[in-house]
């Protein structure tokens, strides 16, 4: 299974969603940007797509809630170790509705996508320092960062 992601205005991404019968088709937004994500076995519908292999999945994604996207750059040599560790961590994740570990087809930045029922669950998880860090994990190739998004209707229409 592949995961496909792109950025755009919420309105544009919503027209793509309405044009295709893909479910779930996750539209997420924050004060800075809007992102669309879906999974399929065929090619991406996006003109400019970030393509991923879904390495591990837990739960079913819904089109409501709150999503965090953790961007984790991994060295080539460290990929097997990272993948083994994080496949297990995804399985053991608590508080999330659904989770995906995504390996990029291009580049070295994996995505840990977690859908939360409530932002409070995300903030509680974040306090446990769940992500690797460059000082302790030699397979990390750069800075790790996490973006958070509201899923569903954009109130700013």
Image (spheres, rainbow, N blue to C red):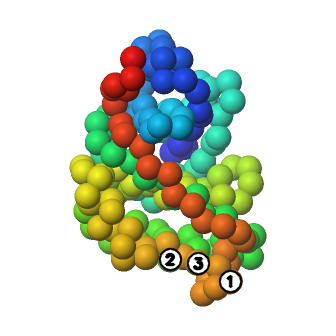
At 59% from the left edge and 34% from the top edge, which residue is drawn?
6
Q: Can residue 132 be seen by looking at this rendering?
A: yes
How many numbered marks are there?
3
Q: Earlier in the sequence, mark 1 or mark 3?
A: 3
Q: Is the residue 87 above or below the residue 61 in the image? A: below
At 74% from the left edge and 54% from the top edge, which residue is drawn?
107
At 33% from the left edge and 59% from the top edge, which residue is drawn?
122
Are the residues tagged 2 and 3 within 8 Å (C-beta)? no
Q: CA distance from mark 2 to mark 1?
A: 13 Å
Which residue has dot 2 on it? 85
Q: Classify residue 44 by image quadrant.
A: top right
Label 3, residues with CA under 10 Å away: few <14, some 14-19, many ≥20:
some
- Dot 1 falls on a residue whose secondary structure is loop
Q: CA distance from mark 2 to mark 3?
A: 13 Å
Q: Earlier in the sequence, mark 2 or mark 1?
A: 2
Residue 22 located left or right of residue 47:
left
State the image coordinates of residue 5 (x, y, percent, origin top left): 56, 38
| Disc 1 versus disc 3: nearer the observer | 3
| Disc 2 versus disc 1: nearer the observer | 1
At 34% from the left edge and 25% from the top edge, which residue is drawn?
155
| Disc 2 versus disc 3: nearer the observer | 3
Label 2, residues with CA under 10 Å away: few <14, some 14-19, many ≥20:
few
Q: Can residue 38 be seen by looking at this rendering?
A: no
Which residue has dot 3 on it? 133
State the image coordinates of residue 123 (x, y, percent, origin top left): 33, 63
Which residue has dot 1 on it? 138
């Amino acid at each position: 299974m592949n995961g496909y992601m792109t950025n755009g205005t919420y309105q544009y991404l919503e027209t793509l969603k309405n044009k295709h019968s893909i479910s779930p088709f996750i539209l997420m937004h924050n004060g800075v940007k809007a992102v669309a994500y879906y999974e399929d076995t065929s090619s991406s519908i996006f003109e400019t797509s970030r393509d991923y292999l879904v390495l591990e999945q837990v739960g079913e994604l819904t089109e409501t809630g709150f999503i965090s996207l953790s961007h984790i750059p991994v060295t080539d040599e460290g990929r097997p170790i990272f993948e083994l560790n994080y496949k297990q961590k995804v399985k053991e994740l608590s508080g999330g509705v659904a989770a995906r570990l995504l390996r990029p087809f291009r580049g070295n930045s994996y995505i840990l996508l977690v859908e939360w029922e409530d932002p409070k669950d995300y903030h509680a998880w974040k306090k446990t320092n769940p992500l690797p860090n460059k000082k302790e994990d030699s397979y990390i190739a750069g800075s790790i960062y996490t973006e958070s998004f509201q899923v569903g209707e954009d109130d700013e229409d």
